[in-house]
Amino acid sequence: MKKKSFSPWWILAFSFAIIWLVIAVAPFYYLIITSLKTMGEFLSGSLFRMPATFNLANYARVFQGRFLTYLLNSVVLILISLSLLLFLSAMAAYPLSRMKFRLNRPIYGLIVAAMSVPIYITLIPVFVMAIRTRTYDTLWALIGPNIAFNLPMSVFILTSFMQGIPRELEEAVEIDGCGKFGAFFKIILPLSTSGLATLGIYNGVVIWNEFSFAMVLTQAPSARPLPLAVWDYQGQYSSNIPVIMAVLALSALPIILLYIFGQDKLVKGMMAGAVKG
């Protein structure tokens, strides 16, 4: 039996993969072990040394505060924002990808150009709009920016994805008497689920971690999402680093679980988009 030979390039690639794995895992390892330390252990011991005992007091201290309120706000915010974002993206991408009309390319060009607009230059206009519409200091003030600034990228990706769906399927249901809306809901939308799942995971991470607009447009703890919990606990505990790390670990956990259970759909959506594009 012939032995497998490993080329130097394969060994080099494997070495880089191991190095990248260590770089990627090290922050999570530091995050978890620090959240299990007392403040004395954190100040006196090595940064990457395991704690003497697995102390869950920091996590208990977090739950005694307003963490659950922040968590509930983020869940409500991401459910409403993602649902509207994906539906509006699909509705916009359908005519751009399947219909021919005079303003198709100009509208598509404007959507692509909107991707280059820095969102932070709109903080003051959005703040003024929130004040005038009386949505300031509510979750509704965050839903609009979450949809508006993630819409161009979502439409761009879904348009390319829908262009790869065979037109014969759409023509077949139209022959059976189905209109454009029927073709969209019965053919195009079901066949776009992998692309929508990919966008859902990507945009979900972006919306979950959004900080700037949440900081500017909300003030009361009852209206603030989870990213601002770090800010709140930092002031409350006077830079108690182990407690802050516990907040960060709990904040990252839902997104990590979402990726673990949805990574197959994410990979399928990316591969399907690559093949169809």
Image (cartoon, grey):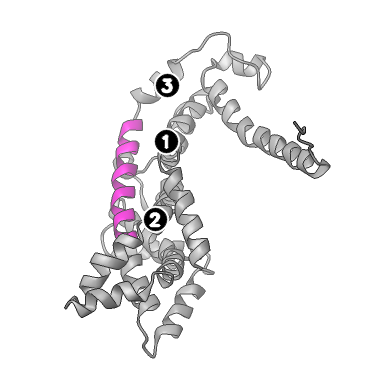
- The amino acid beneath tag 3 is Tyr
Of all residues, the one furthest to the top in this rendering is 52
- Relative to the observer, which residue lies in front, 194 or 104? 194
Q: Quick one: SS at disc 3?
A: helix
Q: Is residue 190 visible?
A: yes
- Relative to the observer, which residue lies in front, 22 or 130? 22
Q: Tag 2: Cα neighbours inside 10 Å, few (<14), some, or many (≥20)?
A: many
Marks 2 and 1, the one that precedes in the sequence: 2
| Vertical position of residue 177 compared to residue 63: above or below | below
Q: Position of residue 69 (x, y in %)?
A: 30, 35
Give the quadrant of the N terminus: top right
Asked whether 71 falls inside the magenta stretch, the response is yes
| Vertical position of residue 6 compared to residue 50: above or below | below
Taken as a whole, is the magenta stretch helix, strand or loop? Answer: helix
Q: CB under 8 Å between callouts 2 and 3? A: no
Could you give the CA–CA distance between mark 2 and mark 1, rounded to whole angstroms?
Answer: 19 Å
Q: Position of residue 23 (x, y in %)?
A: 67, 36
Q: Which residue is mark 3?
A: 59
Q: Which residue is mark 1?
A: 257
Q: Which residues are magenta?
A: 67-86
Of all residues, the one furthest to the bottom in this rendering is 102
- Residue drawn 61% across the image and 32% down it: 25
Q: Quick one: SS at disc 2?
A: helix
